[in-house]
Image: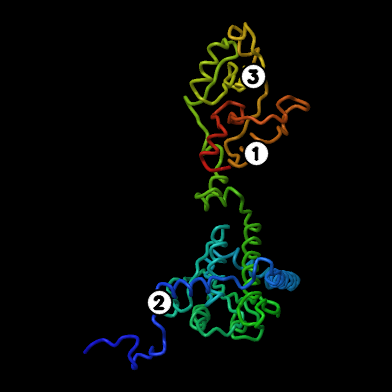
Amino acid sequence: MPMPSWHEHDSGYEDRPVMTAQTVTMATESASKPVFSGTDKAGLVVARDVLLTEADALKVLADALDEQFLHAVAMIAASAGRVVVSGIGKSGHVGRKIAATLSSTGTPALFVHPAEASHGDLGMIVNGDIVLALSNSGETSELADLVAHTRRFGLPLIGVTGRSGSALARAADIVLLLPPVAEACPMGLAPTTSTTLQMALGDALAVALLKRRGFTARDFGAFHPGGRLGAQLRTVGDIMRSGDDMPLVPPDMRMDEAVLLISSKSLGCVGVVDQEGRLIGIVTDGDLRRHMAPDLWQRPVADIMTRDPRTIAPSVLAAEALHAMTGPNRNGPPNSSQTARPINALFVVDATHTPIGVIHIHDLLRAGVA
């Protein structure tokens, strides 16, 4: 039997025009036209109203926080397990972000979709875990099996809801109640203000927990090795050059020998060390220019070097090293010529002021710190 075309009566398309390339283009152009013109300020009025509505709601939430929040923080901090976050719809999207934020700030967490939980993923939740369930109405049917599972096996349940008398609130061990505020959606239907409150409450939990645990920037860096953020959280010891890549000379070496080492190492400097191997000075390209004279090459390094140069420890974050190179020397002598002068390289020293490495600003740039 031949297949019916769009224009046969039993197809239901008998009154529709044939779509051509021209009509498709016209339809696309029409759909892409903005609701507000470039000179129409109505769009800004709407946007500002949304932002102010949500900002006001956040203030209400901040004022409404009570001991239930403290109990939630204490419960999570004392647990050896994970925080299992769950929610459906927009609450589910927020829940994924909350789980990610908790995990990256020292609180192990994962997101379990409530529908998938009903079909086997409840097995992901084990003794020691804490369930954090999000539902603005508190009556989300998809959460029923997950909530029942926590009650059956005695798993702690924290409920985030906007209704104190809801099924979720009645079942939860701890209730983080969202205040009754209007959605920013003019119809009051699209989750807007309520999801902003959920997100902010998740951030508040994560930050309160990281402070309670003493979570540091270095701890944060361990979970963020990629991208610019990861590069900034690497330490000087991770990036520095060491061993034979360090240009070190004694103070009595002649400048004609020292300048060859400056050139060969491509760092624009050499470090000057005493008999015990401690750093006592540095000679840079700038020092050569400032001391240029007919007898420069025959003079000893000690005559030219900058004494007590800026140094850095291997444990310092790479971002701090970049600031030390480009910012003022707050540890230098007052009114010193090196106090505000940016530098291109820093020697890395240990507790005895012995150089263990050197880091150049180009090393930081290549690592993606800047």
Where does label 2 land, which residue?
Answer: 120
Q: Which amino acid is tagged 2?
A: Gly
Query: How did the renderer colour the structure?
Result: rainbow
Asked whether the residues under the numbered discs 2 and 3 touch, taking CB atoms below 8 Å apart as contact, a structural biologist would say no
Question: Which mark identifies residue 323?
Answer: 1
Residue 355 against residue 4 in the figure, above or below: above
Image coordinates of residue 316 in percent, x first then y, are: 60, 39
Tell me which residue sits at (72%, 29%) in the image.
339
Q: Which amino acid is tagged 1?
A: His
Mark nearest the camera among 2 and 1 is 1
- Rounded to the nearest whole Å, what is the CA distance between mark 2 and mark 1? 51 Å
Q: Earlier in the sequence, mark 1 or mark 3?
A: 3
Image coordinates of residue 282 in percent, x first then y, are: 62, 21
Residue 169 against residue 361 in the figure, above or below: below
Where does label 3 land, which residue?
Answer: 287
- Rounded to the nearest whole Å, what is the CA distance between mark 1 and mark 3? 22 Å
Q: Nearer the viewer, residue 66 or 114?
A: 114
Question: Which mark identifies residue 50?
Answer: none
Quadrant in the rendering for residue 254: top right
Tell me which residue sits at (56%, 43%) in the image.
369
Tell me which residue sits at (31%, 86%) in the image.
5
